[in-house]
Amino acid sequence: MAMMTKMREQTHIVLGILLIAFLALIVVEWGSESTIFRPKQQTGVIASINGQDIHYEQFARAYEQQIEQYKQQAGAEPNENQYEYLRNQVWENLVREVLVTQEIEKRGISVTNSEIRHYIFKEPPELIKQNPSFKNDQGEFDNAKYQAALNDANAGEFWRQVETYLRASLPYQKFQDEFEATALVTDAEVRDDYVKRNQKATVKYVFFNPEKYRARAGAANNGQIPVEKSAVEKYFKEHEQEFKDPEKRKIDYIIFSNKATRADSDSVRVLAGQILQRARSGEDFAALAQDYSEDESNRDKGGDLGFFKRGQMVKPFEDAAFAANPGDIIGPVQTTFGLHIIKVVAKKFEEPEGESKDKKPKGKEAAKGEEMVQASHVLLKFEASRRTIDAARDSASYFSTAAKEAGWETTLQNEKLPGQTSPLFAKGSGFVPGVGMKPSVSNFVFRSETGTISEMFEVPQGFIVLRVAEIQKERIRPLEEVQAQIENILRTEKLKDMALEAAKAARAKLNGSMTMEDLAAQDSLEIKTAEPFARTGYISGLGRDPAFIGTAFSLQPNQISPAVKGNRGAYLLQLVSVDPINEADLQSQKETIRGQLLERAKQNAFSLWYTDLKEKAKIQDFRDLYF
């Protein structure tokens, strides 16, 4: 009975994992209640996936669960960007699970009673085996405990939950098995992966820097490297897709500031003066800090900052504290944080590290230690008052209403307000010029027509009202816009080609008995030795250069390469050595590598299949109506 009680206590863990692992079932079973994301309009369909409607309540429930999970893990509320990320994550999970469920039904994958019995009695799933009730003292699955639970007449409810879990999960497991069956990893692939990551080469090389040839390339054209118009046009035609511009939009906007006004700041200074007088009159400083201080890190401790050295506080605070005597109450001291009322509690000199008590400095020698101050403070920040914030909000709300009725420009003129216009910007990450990261504003802009005037949005700077001023559709940027960029690319390539020709000429001198060192001495070249690098690694000072790395591993020891054109310029390489394969180490890692490659192959197989399935699916996204 004790074991079964423990099993029942673990049931919520099993069910919690089911909620995460089998979202498709949740879609079917979710109720109609939602607490914090119900829109003003009657809830309806938020998505249609191949004709299957997904209701707002279903999405909202998953969204709430995702937010709660985030809070538990992060220990804080998500910010706006994180909310956007979580919504997108829920959406992608929902679409994937619905598409997979539809495919399972299409393929007729199901589970029989005999399969349920088999997995319960002969092959318990890993989730059940991980239940602490079935583990021994070493944390391993104990089949004897499991069999005892199977025969326990009081465990009926637990096993019914297990059966429900298996009926839900086994079709997905069968579906997954079909992909895993196509994933194979050979011994040759295991060895190749080990060699790529572990075998290292050491090379000597000469670098032919393209910049060395810039003066020569532009000598006949006043230092400017000539680029033919036909070459620019050819490059543009061959790389047209690289100059694709996403849809961009421009907004007119006005921000009603929520920053502290002069009146707000004057109020803070008056309050600081009052607190200073009350403290000097004998009121309890800790009580004043608890009542008034806006430094949440120490307010509950009466503003106590403990002991600190010079350099640990902002300079105005530090200068005031170290200049005062214990017991002094000073201020207001202004810093970047606000106004401080400071009470100096004590002073001492830090004992030099490593000194024994017998060697502790005494008398005047104590001054040899570093002076420290203990202080408490009351911090008052220069922040906008509630009246200032409410006034800014009211002004923004009024402007939005008036602009919709009388027009944007007319309202700006009537209210004598300085409107602003952003540059064109893409939807992308949610960044809005003049505003910053604000996905809600970006989303409004990109779902609205030209001329649409927004309601008020709260942003870090205050409250914004905007108008969609211009829409530039997705396009290929015209040649005249990118011509200078292409010319720079072609000039860089021309310099690299000149470096390559120089490398070829130098290589031609090495056909006889001349060594790389002889060549370097003759042509004033510098030979460098790269730190050992693997095929999948980086070369110190050069980064990851596939041409350099590929050439190095194609050489025999002491062999000198042909001229190589890399990312930064041209090279001549001489292989010094290649590490031999550590066969014993390979054998010890073989199965681990095989497992990693197999998992990667499984993921790739599913990813390729799912990408194709999603592209062919008819997915209608109505999230903009709700968020």
Image: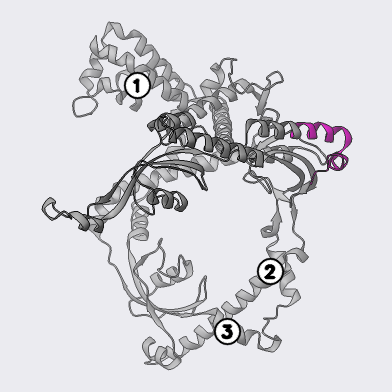
Establish if 601 lies above or below 133.
Answer: below
- Please name the residue that numbered disc 2 is placed on: 486
Residue 281, how many percent across, how many down?
Answer: 44, 33
Q: Residue at x 26, y 19 (%)?
A: 133
Quarter of the picture holding the N terminus: top left
Estimate the spatial distance between the alpha carbons at disc 2 and disc 3, rounded to whole Å. 20 Å
User: Quick check: is 521 in the magenta stretch?
Assistant: no
Secondary structure mainly formed by the magenta segment? helix
Q: What residue does disc 1 label?
A: 119
Q: Earlier in the sequence, mark 1 or mark 2?
A: 1
Q: CA distance from mark 1 to mark 2?
A: 63 Å
Give the number of the mark in front: 3 or 1: 3
Q: Picture quarter containing residue 600?
A: top left
Percent across and percent down for residue 373 are 34, 47
Residue 584 is labelled as none
The amino acid type, in three-letter code, at marker 1 is Tyr
Q: Quadrant of the C terminus?
A: top right
Q: In the visual, does 467 lie left or right of 438?
A: right
Q: Nearer the viewer, residue 595 or 571?
A: 571
Q: Residues within 10 Å of mark 2 (few under 14, many from 20)?
A: some
**Can you identify the residue that label 3 sits on?**
213
Q: Amino acid at mark 3?
A: Tyr
* Left or right: 420 in relation to 285: right
* Residue projecting furthest to the left: 358
